Image (cartoon, helix red, strand yellow):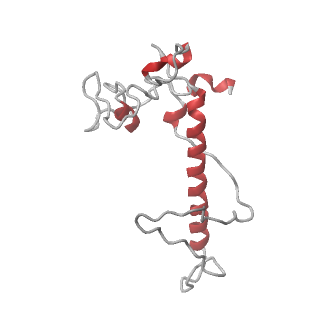
Amino acid sequence: MIAEDRRPWVEEELSEDEEKGLNAKCAVPWLIISGLVMLIAGVLSAKYVHSTQLVSTTEPCPGFDVCPVYPMPYAHGQWPNEPTLAGEFPPGFIWGLGTASYQIEGAYREDGRGASIWDTFVGADTVDMPGANCSYCCKEAPCPINPSMFVKGATGNVACDHWHTWKDD
C-alpha cells in the first residue's frame, strides 16, 4: 500500500509500522486534546465540588466572594476578533492528563478485550467478541464502516500498541 491512498500529497511507501496502523505523530494531537478536555473537566468539577461543600445555600454564588462574570454566547453570525477568555487556576490546582484506551492500547481481540462503540464505528470485525451482542454491533463480517469515518479502514486495532510496548515507555 502506498501513502497516496490516505494522503495523496505523500508518494513514499508506508513503513511496516504505518501499515499496521502505528503512527506516533497521530497520537500526540489526540493526547493533547484529551489532556485539555480532562483539564477543563477537572477545573469545572473542582469549582462544582467546592461550591457544593458550603453550608449555606442562600448565597447567590456559593463558594465565591463575588459572583463570577461569565461571557454570554455570541449571537448568530457574530464572532470575536480576539480571545475573550481569561483567568487563572486556583492555588493548589493539580494538573493531570487522560486519554482513551482505544487511542492507546491496541491489542485488538487479545486477553478478552471486548468490543467497544469505537470498534462498531470504524467497522472493525467485532463478531464473537465479548460485549458484541448489542443491537448496533456487527453480526457478520465484513462489518460496515460508519459513513462519517473520514479515513475509511482506519481503526484502533493496533493504535499506539501500548498493550505490547508498555515496558518500553
Q: Is residue 100 above or below residue 167?
A: below
For the C terminus, the quadrant is top right
Direction bottom: furthest residue: 58
Q: Nearer the viewer, residue 10 or 56?
A: 10
- Residue 142 falls left or right of residue 90: left
- Return the x and y of residue 8 as percentages of the image width and height: 46, 23
- Residue 86 falls left or right of residue 120: right
Q: Nearer the viewer, residue 14 or 125?
A: 14
Q: Is residue 11 above or below residue 37?
A: above
Figure label count: 0
Direction right: furthest residue: 91
Dividing the picture into quadrants, the one containing residue 57 is bottom right
- Residue 17 falls left or right of residue 8: right
The answer to whether residue 49 is visible is: yes
Dividing the picture into quadrants, the one containing residue 87 is bottom right
- Return the x and y of residue 160 as percentages of the image width and height: 56, 27
The answer to whether residue 131 is visible is: no
- Residue 78 falls left or right of residue 164: left
Q: Nearer the viewer, residue 114 or 41?
A: 41
For the N terminus, the quadrant is top left
At 59% from the left and 50% from the top, the residue drawn is 36
- Return the x and y of residue 130 as percentages of the image width and height: 37, 30
At 58% from the left and 76% from the top, the residue drawn is 69
